[in-house]
Amino acid sequence: MACAASSVKGSLNVGGAKAFRNNLFRDYLKSSVSYPVPEISSPIRLQHVAYGSNLIVSDSKSRDLSVKLASTNGSLKVSEERVTVLVIGGGGREHALCYALERSPSCDAVFCAPGNSGIAQSGDATCIPDLDISNSDAVISFCRNWGVGLVVVGPEAPLVAGLANELVNAGIPTFGPSSEAAALEGSKDFMKKLCDKYHIPTAKYQTFTDPSDAKKYVKEQGAPIVVKADGLAAGKGVVVAMTLEKAFEAIDSMLVEGSFGSAGSRVIIEEYLEGEEVSFFALVDGETALPLESAQDHKRVGDGDVGPNTGGMGAYSPAPIVTEKLKCKVMESIIVPTVKGMAAEGCKFVGVLYAGIMIEKKSGLPKLIEYNVRFGDPECQVLMMRLQSDLAQVLLAACRGELGSVSLTWSPELATVVVMASEGYPGVYKKGTVIKNIDEAEQVSPAVKIFHAGTALDRDGNFVAAGGRVLGVTAKGKDIEEARAKAYDALDVVDWPEGFFRHDIGWRAQKYRRMVAH
């Protein structure tokens, strides 16, 4: 289980951070709970940019800055008490992070690489489409040239590839785990073995590379049963097989046909857990874990939770099923032992732990389904809509091992997001279809925000679909009914005949409320 230790300490060249933390966090943020781990012995609008020179970055925020940020020689001058942030990625999750960072009082400017056309048009970040995020030297050069004081890595692939390692080694504060720690998502076998070793409750399992052995085990266990590709498979490497035949098909697809490449060269066969699934997030600085608000998403493509799994068709926060008692149980039995175990293995985790949790129907107790090492999509959208803290300073505290002094404040309102996807998703879908009235939809209510997950601009300046999940129509309200109503009112304004969405996002929250009321 041992893995090479990775430094998580980076230099922070932002003056006044200590005073900011001591004063603003104490006075502005309401009380929350952090979980220390026991000691261990072992807008800024830009479509195309040559980012080395001649980039004028104007402030897009409502607050008044005494000077515009400008560069003609590849350097960005930032006032000492502020921070410039680079977000890595270009989907709905990254748009939501840019949105929250742009609102952060201490954040001077937000860059997003590569970003997308919708993020750029929204004014929530300056998009850098020419920056190759797979080239760590290029990312480091950009950060140094433009005075970036914090990098936030959105997707899992760059983390597994080691981007955070390189940035931290270059002295650039980076929110996201090392490649060694990112194995929690990069290898389900690694995650399961960690659970075994540190007594973290999860579904029983076996790992296989031989299809015959895997099928024999499936026959012994019976259906329903779950077949998972060991590595990263873009959210598509999990098959919930309700019959033995479906399980055999999944095994053949991964181990014989190689449908997921090297990611499926090893499979995990695990027991089917019956219950309700929730998303649980915690910020981690290597030793301390700080839970975020709860969220619950809808994985199935169709109304009533039917059809194939997707990356997520909608979500809401908070999830009423996650009570304070359950939150404490998850922290104590799952999150804290994981943070402690990773440190004991020599690879402290720094970033966000996203735990897929099954609340078992029989026992009512939480079990870990799997870990992601980044924010979820679309859960990130509803979380960032509700977050009222200065996200930039919170993430910097995580990078510096100082989460123990941080608390968070959240809007008391509920937030919901409904995903608009291209017809045919999660299967074959058409790209390039025109989407109209996005701006008009966002004007339906001040409580509505539309996050762009997969949009581009055509030659006529129209937004077009460039992916499977394309828009995240998000809204806040005093309860689930009001938030849903605002989101669906905005959806009605969007003109996109080739798009579709679920009409029942939030139904579990409504069901839970009715159950509690009676």
Image: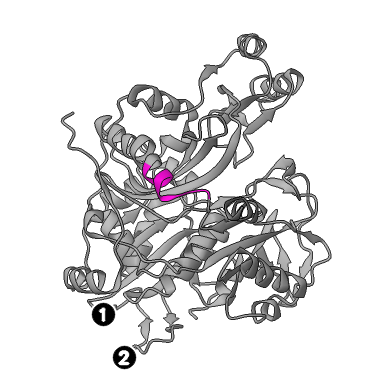
Q: Is residue 112 visible?
A: no
Give residue 451's quadrant in the image: bottom right
Q: Residue at x 61, y 62 (%)?
A: 417
Give residue 150's quadrant in the image: bottom left
Q: Is residue 218 visible?
A: yes
Residue for badge 2: 66
Give residue 236's quadrant in the image: top right
Crowd tier of the residue under label 2, counting other residues whose Cα lies within 10 Å: few below 14, some 14–19, many 20 or above:
few
Q: CA distance from mark 2 to mark 1?
A: 10 Å
Q: Is residue 25 left or right of residue 319?
A: left
Residue kind at label 1, given as amino acid type: Ser
Which of 291 and 438 lies nearest the eye of the viewer? Answer: 291
Quarter holding the N terminus? top left
Which percent across, then down, holds residue 453?
A: 61, 61
Q: Is residue 268 left or right of residue 139?
A: right
Residue kind at label 2, given as amino acid type: Ser
Up/down of 494 relative to 433, above or below: below
